[in-house]
Amino acid sequence: VAHTHSRFATAWAQAARPIPCLGTTHADYFRGEVPLTDPLTGEEITSAYEVNTGLAIARRLESMDPEATPGALVVGHGPFCWGRSATAAAQTAAALEEIARIAYLTIGLNPSASPIPQALSEKHFLRKHGPAAYYGQRRTETEQD
Amino acid sequence: VAHTHSRFATAWAQAARPIPCLGTTHADYFRGEVPLTDPLTGEEITSAYEVNTGLAIARRLESMDPEATPGALVVGHGPFCWGRSATAAAQTAAALEEIARIAYLTIGLNPSASPIPQALSEKHFLRKHGPAAYYGQRRTETEQD
Amino acid sequence: VAHTHSRFATAWAQAARPIPCLGTTHADYFRGEVPLTDPLTGEEITSAYEVNTGLAIARRLESMDPEATPGALVVGHGPFCWGRSATAAAQTAAALEEIARIAYLTIGLNPSASPIPQALSEKHFLRKHGPAAYYGQRRTETEQD
Amino acid sequence: VAHTHSRFATAWAQAARPIPCLGTTHADYFRGEVPLTDPLTGEEITSAYEVNTGLAIARRLESMDPEATPGALVVGHGPFCWGRSATAAAQTAAALEEIARIAYLTIGLNPSASPIPQALSEKHFLRKHGPAAYYGQRRTETEQD
């Protein structure tokens, strides 16, 4: 797991907004939006705060595929990413920051910008990930996710 | 052809906005706006996606002069630039990113900023490009466009 | 005392807005908002301006704990930070700039973003500062504040 | 004279807005707003464009003190700065870009941010410039303006 307070991903977390899939840069790494956790209760904060932060992420992912969603935003806090290795998690953290940055700029130019069509996001994600991948640089075994 | 996911040009593509000619920095490189492609249909995405992306650019340029418009934005994706050499295409990609960046800042200061008068944009483009060019550093034969 | 004209903290001072505690990055350094001074009167400006700027900060802090609020914004001017050593003050100035930057981005994404719950900001501040601190790198005696 | 297409100053020029004096960073360099030229007519653009650009700056400065206003924005184009030496003009160009950048951020946080009181801007300008200057690093003769 890689946890950062990188600027743009943290800003989305502080703004309490999941990051919609606004372009193919995003779809190359995440299959759908970057999710946002629900806030912790007062009791979850005062007792075992760090564990409860992890549980909030786990709850948010219950209905999702963690390999297709390799990171999440903890509301009011910042991004947490994961992968099959520490290196893969850190690479995802760097990619998420870039995705968050371009999404911030997009919203600045068009506050009601729409997510790209699902056919396009699926195409970009699946041509790079999973058994039918055919595009991009071949990854070493360590990097695969 | 040079294709990047540079931040500001990609944000304009994701915001689904062509870049208007808001200043002389822009007019030094592009004769008029930086155009935006129409979205691909679902079928164009699922079959021969990469070829169809190229065809969408070609369709958008049908009524334009590709030497005066050395790049375009593919909606939801990012910028594609071209030129008489790979170096010229890459230089245009770098210039387009700067143009996109200053245009983003301009919109932040004045959401209804107007394009510059056509007399001014024509003056800037034509004093640097074409047979009557008289301004700027002389280019080597490779760089000319 | 460390005084800078760092970009984002100065922008909050020029915008005449205290920085609300929008996330845990902020709460790791400041217990509550970064305060903003009241404007000087014309007479305070023309006579002993530099001394009066200091007095405006002191007035603003009268009801606050200067160890839990290691910096303030002087309206129309910029940030001033302090600490038990010059190094500590400079470190706070750098942290404040990063806090101001992420808060700026947050407001861009959500103009009505709310401060985080007090239970969360207290948790983050107190797990790093004061007698019950248990989180983060141990500080040398010089760095402690 | 130093002419650049620096990002933030050019954005203000493209947005057709003079830069108001929003803080003391600005007042340390300019006595009042950074002025904006009027647009050129079509005929001024097609004949002797470069000379007419200079004349537009001169017209704008007619009622101002060029030593207290060491630069201006040409609408739709970008910043031009001057000084007693090329070095001084280039230093002003760098300062103007920083002023333009912080002013951009200020407007993002508070679109109706007010200029600082005249007593404050006069204090900052005059404690650094002119016969009664008493603040800041002593300048060499070349740097003085």
Image (cartoon, coloured by chain):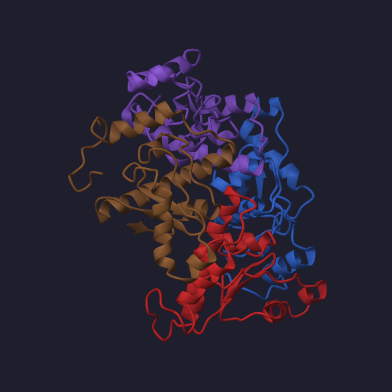
Chain colours: A red, B brown, C blue, D purple
Residue at left offset 34%, top offset 42%: B65
- Most extreme residue toward the top is D63
Q: From what the image shows, is residue A73 above or below residue B70?
A: below
Q: Quadrant of the C terminus of chain C?
A: bottom right
Q: From what the image shows, is residue A131 above or below residue D55?
A: below
Q: Is residue A29 visible?
A: no
Q: Position of residue A104 (x, y in %)?
A: 58, 55
Q: From what the image shows, is residue D15 above or below residue C59?
A: above
- Most extreme residue toward the left is B141
Q: Position of residue D22 (x, y in %)?
A: 60, 33
Residue at left offset 65%, top offset 74%: C135
Q: Quadrant of residue C137?
A: bottom right
Q: Report whether B67 appears left or right of B97.
A: left
Q: Position of residue B137 (x, y in %)?
A: 23, 37
Q: From what the image shows, is residue D58 above or below residue C88?
A: above
Q: Report whether A81 appears left or right of B59.
A: right
Q: Report whether C67 appears left or right of D64.
A: right
Q: Quadrant of residue B55?
A: bottom left
Q: Exactly how many numbered labels are in the figure?
A: 0
Q: Quadrant of residue C44?
A: top right
Foreground of the two, A13 or C69? A13
Foreground of the two, D48 or D36? D48
Q: Is residue D15 visible?
A: yes
